[in-house]
Image (cartoon, rainbow, N blue to C red):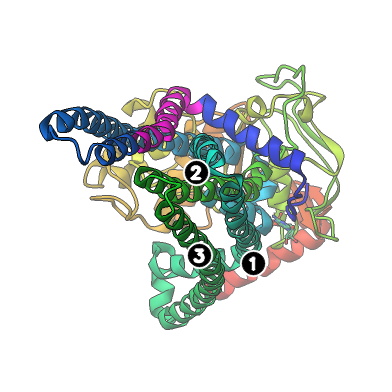
Amino acid sequence: MTFKHIPRYRPLQIVANLTRALQMVWRIAARWTVFNTVLVLLQGFLPLATLYLVKRVVDFVTSNITAPDKSAVFEQALFWIILAGAVALLSALTRALGEYAAEAQSLYVTDAIADILHEQSIAVDLRYYEDPSYYDTLHRAQKEAPFRPTKIVNGLIQLAQNSISLLGILVLLISFGGWTASLLILVGLPGVTLRMMHSKRLYTFDKNQTEKERRANFYHNVLVDVPFAKEVRLFNLGELFKDRYHQLRTEIRNGKLSLGARRVRSELMAQTLVTLALFGALAWFAWRALNGTLSLGDVLVYFLGFQGGLNFLQGLLRALAGLYEDNLFLTNLYHFLDLQPAIQSPDNPQVVPQPMQNGLSFEQVSFHYPGRSQPALQDINIRIAPGEVIALVGENGSGKTTLVKLLCRLYDPTQGTIKADHIDIRDFNPSEWRKQIGITFQDFARYAMTVRENIWLGNPENDPTLELVTRAAERAGADEFIRNLPKGYETMLGHWFFQGQELSGGEWQKIALARNFWREANILVLDEPTSALDAIAEEKLFQAFRTVLAKRTGILISHRFSTVQMADCIYVLDNGQIIESGTHAELLANKGHYAYLYQSQAQYYQMED
Ligand code: ADP
């Protein structure tokens, strides 16, 4: 699926999009939506009732202006005044309650949509995370999704409310003379056309802006986030990133302001037309009153009616234009939600063998990253028996990590199959299969949580008792330094939160290893596990690794030959292909690429000695 999505403006599509938003809101906050709707509709009726009652008062007073018993007249007038006041009060009450209901509805919907976005973020394949247009889509969805569906519901309610009020007023005006009603409609139309044109411009502008906004966010992060703080100071990058951020934000702001200015110009035009119509109508009413064809009450009610009618009409058209705009922006959310993960569970998944009896095999596996012309892996054949440890060796970019990603089903091979006990791993439920694999990637995660939680996250299904967590930490050689932390296993890690403790690269790596060992998985993968470890820690780790492995399968990726030597079989990768395999001794005897790499490293150490 491509991300370059252009929304279509077909009416059926618009209706389908709006219906989907309504269903979403209904599922999330049905009761608040009903409450809100009732209140808003009431607000549509009540102004009409007030208008009618005020007219009664004015007419009553003018017709009795010459009556001798003023207090009796006033008493009767008072009845209508109190009634009008009560209706106005009710109107105020419904408004206040309506605001609360609308806020509650919107808060529920916003939070639930964040949940939906998070769910989809977890569900999509890893490849989306390696595609910039994915981030554009996600960014747009995140920006718009939380409030657009609520806005649609409120837009529809507004539409209903304004329609009811407008209908009442139109009936009133038509009884006075059809032309005022037509005038009302006529002067309202330019406003809505201009507004819809603005919505379209805004949407296109916003879409083209996404990459710029994300770039500005990145520059902002460089300036404020921990991972960049050292280099920013050392290389004196602060001003450079500050300027770049400033420049981008200026471009974005100027774009928005010029759009805003265009909008103000068209609004002004529309409003001038409306005002002219309104006061033209007043002149006409005044003329008729002077000629005795209208009572003062009539003048009042028609003027207020015409003014109210214009407001309602504008409200109605604004709601329509708003719905049009919401629909445009919602396509971003739908587009994100409709991304289908390619890696899914088959309908009848096979049971994952545990432990494996025959082991793992890569059979003629090839893989292309999307959008790359060169294959990352080509015709890979590897067999690993249970209890065996293999090592992958090769220069940077030779395909070692990619092979592991295929094993974890973060991607599927473009050709060939990976099998566990002769079953294609695509026949398993991916999450059941992944439970079999414990992996420490080179770019492992650092969670701003306690040490205990950092280890426990390797398998949250297990209860993190201190005894078990300590055992995993010991195997990773982490227990000793953890005990020296201010609160031991309860120490908060990282700089994010209060009393957080920053660790060295090697210490973080040991925590990541402990997380992996905590998992007690049947296949253990270590991708450059010792890159940040010192020699003694490395030695200890491999002693532990053998113990942890017992009858399990191990895959090691390393540049250090001291690490690699322990493997039962070493595979040498070059440009995505296996060019050699065998034990350390066999490969040295071969005098091939492995022997060459080994000699270069050995030479380096000898020179150091
Ligand atoms: P190694 O682990 O041996 O250093 P990798 O498996 O990470 O190598 O990379 C193998 C090749 O695939 C490299 O040419 C790299 O540029 C490419 N590659 C790695 N990850 C991606 C990705 N997410 N998208 C596109 N190409 C990638």
Q: Which amino acid is tagged 3?
A: Leu
Front of the two marks 2 and 1: 2
- Give the x, y percent position of residue 566: 63, 45
Quarter of the figure with residue 125 = top right
Whether 286 is drawn above or below 337: the answer is: below
User: Gap between marks 2 and 1, in whole Å?
Assistant: 55 Å
The main secondary structure of the magenta stretch is helix
Element marked by disc 3: helix
Q: Which residue is mark 3?
A: 276
Q: Are marks 2 and 1 in contact (CB under 8 Å)?
A: no
User: Gap between marks 3 and 1, in whole Å?
Assistant: 88 Å
Q: Which amino acid is tagged 1?
A: Gln
Q: Which residue is mark 1?
A: 601
| Quadrant in which ligand 1 is drawn | bottom right
Q: Which residue is mark 2?
A: 146
- Give the x, y percent position of residue 73: 18, 31
